Image (cartoon, rainbow, N blue to C red):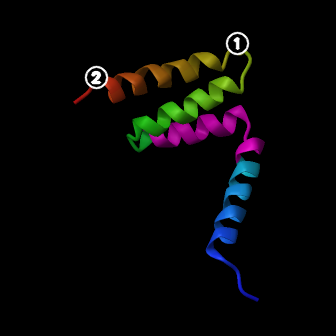
Amino acid sequence: MTTCKFCNAFNIVILLLIILHCLLANDCFELGRLAYLEKDYYHTLLWMNEARNRLSDDDPFNAAILDYLAYATYMVWFAD
């Protein structure tokens, strides 16, 4: 059986879409926190924004996400 590179790439994209759709806000937060600990502030912003989007506005967990977002934004835009 032969498979084309496009088919493999397509299957990977579909798998990633399924995984990303199943992530909870806490999962996104943990990925953002890991990026933060690795000093990867760009990806911290991406994951923390996704975590924030998956929560309601009155969730108390938003305060922690906003703390990470504030620092990561500073590091991406203003730090040397």
Q: Quadrant of the C terminus?
A: top left
Compared with 33, 59 (above or below) is: above
SS state under label 1: loop
Answer few, some or many: residues within 10 Å of disc 1's Cα (few below 14, many 20 plus, some between 14 and 19): few
Residue at 68% from the left image edge and 15% from the top image edge: 60
Residue at 48% from the left image edge and 25% from the top image edge: 68
Residue range in magenta is 20-36
> Residue 55: percent from the left, percent from the top?
72, 22
User: Label 2, on which residue?
Assistant: 78
How far apart in space, not on screen, are marks 2 and 1 (Cα)? 27 Å
- How would you classify the magenta stretch by its main secondary structure? helix
Whichever of callouts 2 and 1 sits on the residue coming sooner in the sequence is: 1
Q: Quadrant of the N terminus?
A: bottom right
User: Label 1, on which residue?
Assistant: 57
Compared with 58, 41 (above or below) is: below
Q: Name the image quarter holding residue 23.
A: top right
Residue at 57% from the left image edge and 23% from the top image edge: 65
User: Does the magenta-highlighted stretch encompass residue 78?
Assistant: no
Q: Name the image quarter holding residue 76.
A: top left
Answer few, some or many: residues within 10 Å of disc 2's Cα (few below 14, many 20 plus, some between 14 and 19): few
